[in-house]
Image (spheres, rainbow, N blue to C red):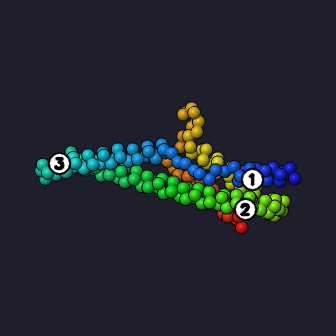
């Protein structure tokens, strides 16, 4: 039991002392692809609109071809709106994750300051049976978070071995990441009190 506590304490101290508080972001291939698809659908919708307007200007008779063109325009416009809604949903999820990560970085900084200023208190909490659970919860939450991030990001060199996900699955994993970050933030705030 003492070896488990010592291992947990060493993992947490190593984690809190070695975290870099400077995060960098880079290009996001998924978001870039979604914006490219959005631009392509918008271009098709505008072309269909031009065809519809040209048909209206040449004569006011609606033939079978013009009705088909109108229906095609409406279908493309609906697809355009659906893809735009998907892009807005992804953007909102990414912003939510960004805010949770920012909050986590602040909380880790506070916990790190407490560890540096009062290491005896950290050890006292680690040896307390009732308060030791918070360390276990933080570690488990961090592992869940890492598993979700690994699931959504293509990390493997071989592209065929990367996870293939539907858009719904991607949204679900992004929501899980945000919820795990929120839980981790709550635990870190509790630990820093």
The reply to whether residue 68 is visible in this rendering is no
Residue 85, above or below 35 = below
Residue 136, given in percent of the width and then of the height, sits at 76, 56
Upstream in sequence: badge 1 or badge 3: 1
Q: Which residue is mark 1?
A: 12
Disc 3 residue crowd, few under 14, some 14–19, many 20+, Cα 10 Å: few
Residue 165 locus on image (x, y percent)? 53, 43
Along the polypeptide, which appears first: circle 3 or circle 2? 3
Place of residue 54 in the rendered image (x, y in percent of width and height, measured from the top left): 17, 48
Residue drawn at (36%, 50%) of the image:
79
- Tell me if mark 2 has few (under 14), some (14-19) or many (20+) residues whose alpha carbon lies within 10 angstroms of its own: some
Q: Is residue 33 above or below residue 12?
A: above
Q: From the viewer's side, name the closer residue of 2 and 109.
A: 109
Question: Could you say which is closer to the camera, residue 8 or residue 63?
Answer: 8
Dots 1, 3 in contact, CB < 8 A = no
Q: Residue at x 19, y 51 (%)?
A: 53
Q: CA distance from mark 1 to mark 3?
A: 68 Å
Q: Give me the disc on residue 101.
A: none
SS type, badge 1: helix
Residue 173 or residue 190, whichever sits in front: 190
Placement of the C terminus among the 4 image quadrants: bottom right
Q: Earlier in the sequence, mark 1 or mark 2?
A: 1
Circle 2 — which element? helix
Tell me the tag on residue 114: 2
Whether residue 130 appears in this view of the structure is yes
Residue 54 marker: 3
Q: CA distance from mark 3 to mark 2?
A: 70 Å
Left or right: where 2 falls relative to 15: right
Residue 82: image location, x then y, percent? 40, 53
Measure the alpha-carbon separation of dots 1 and 2: 13 Å
């Amino acid at each position: 039991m003492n070896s488990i506590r010592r291992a947990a304490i060493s993992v947490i101290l190593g984690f809190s002392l070695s975290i870099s508080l400077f995060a960098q972001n880079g290009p996001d291939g998924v978001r870039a692809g979604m914006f490219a698809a959005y631009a392509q659908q918008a271009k098709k919708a505008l072309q269909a609109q031009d065809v519809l307007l040209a048909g209206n200007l040449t004569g006011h008779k609606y033939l079978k071809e013009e009705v088909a063109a109108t229906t095609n325009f409406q279908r493309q416009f609906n697809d355009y709106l659906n893809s735009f809604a998907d892009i807005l949903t992804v953007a909102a999820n990414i912003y939510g994750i960004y805010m949770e990560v920012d909050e986590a970085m602040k909380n880790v900084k506070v916990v790190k300051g407490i560890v540096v200023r009062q290491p005896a208190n950290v050890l006292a909490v680690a040896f307390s049976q009732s308060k030791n659970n918070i360390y276990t919860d933080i570690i488990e939450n961090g592992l869940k978070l890492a598993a979700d991030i690994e699931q959504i990001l293509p990390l493997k060199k071989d592209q065929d071995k990367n996870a293939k996900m539907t858009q719904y699955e991607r949204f679900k994993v992004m929501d899980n990441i945000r919820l795990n970050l929120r839980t981790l933030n709550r635990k870190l705030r509790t630990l820093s009190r």
